[in-house]
Amino acid sequence: MRKLRTGDEVIVIAGKDKGKRGQVDSFVGENRLIIPNVNIAKKHVKANPNAGEAGGIIDKAMPLNISNVAIFNAATGKADRVGIKFLEDGKKVRFYKSNNEVIA
C-alpha cells in the first residue's frame, strides 16, 4: 500500500518550490510524482501543422521526488507523516501520525 495516492493534498518540504501545496496528479515510476503548478519548467515545442498545434514555449509540470513532499493534514494545518494500520474489521487504512486520524 502506497503512503501517498493520486488526489492526496501534499505540501512540498524541500527544493525551489518549498511551501507550495497541491494535489497529486499522477505518479511517474515508483518514487516520482507530478503536482500541477509545482516544479514548472519551460519547454520549447515545435509546431505541428498537421495536428493543428502551435509552436512556442510552454510551462510544463515536471516530476518531483516523493521524498520532497509530505501529506498535508488539514486538521493541524501542517505537513504530516503517514502510517498504515489494520482496523478491527481487518481493513487496512492510512492514518496521520500526529493525531491518529484515518485518512479518507
Image (cartoon, rainbow, N blue to C red):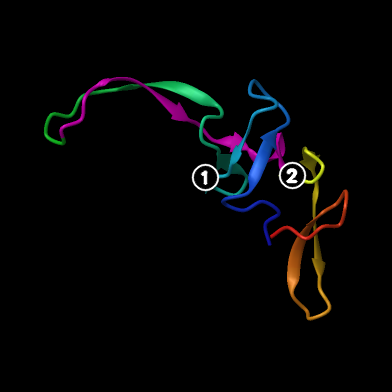
Question: Which residue is labeled 2 in the image?
Answer: 74
Q: Position of 81 compared to 33: left or right?
A: right
Above or below, 21 against 81 in this view is above
SS class, disc 1? loop
Q: Is residue 17 covered in magenta?
A: no
Say which of marks 2 and 1 sits in front. 2
Which sits earlier in the primary sequence, circle 2 or circle 1? 1
Type of the residue with mark 1: Asp
Q: Quadrant of residue 76?
A: top right
3 above or below 69? below
Is 65 contained in the magenta span? yes
Q: Depth check: 68 or 31 in front?
A: 68
Q: Residues within 10 Å of mark 2 (few under 14, many from 20)?
A: few
Q: Which mark is residue 25?
A: 1
Instruction: Tell me the residue at 74%/75% (across/down).
Output: 91
Residue 104 position, x and y percent, is 69, 60
Check disc 2 and give the amino acid type. Answer: Ala
Question: In which quadrant of the rendered view does residue 50 lie?
Answer: top left
Which image quadrant for residue 24?
top right
Question: What is the spatial separation of the Cα atoms under label 2 and label 1, in whole angstroms?
Answer: 19 Å
Residue at horizontal 79%, vertical 46%?
Answer: 75
Residue at coordinates 72% horizontally, 42% vertically from top-left?
Answer: 72
Q: Which contiguous range is marked in magenta? A: 52-71
Q: Position of residue 97 (x, y in %)?
A: 86, 51
Asked if marks 2 and 1 touch (Cβ < 8 Å), the reply is no
- Helix, strand, or loop for circle 2? loop
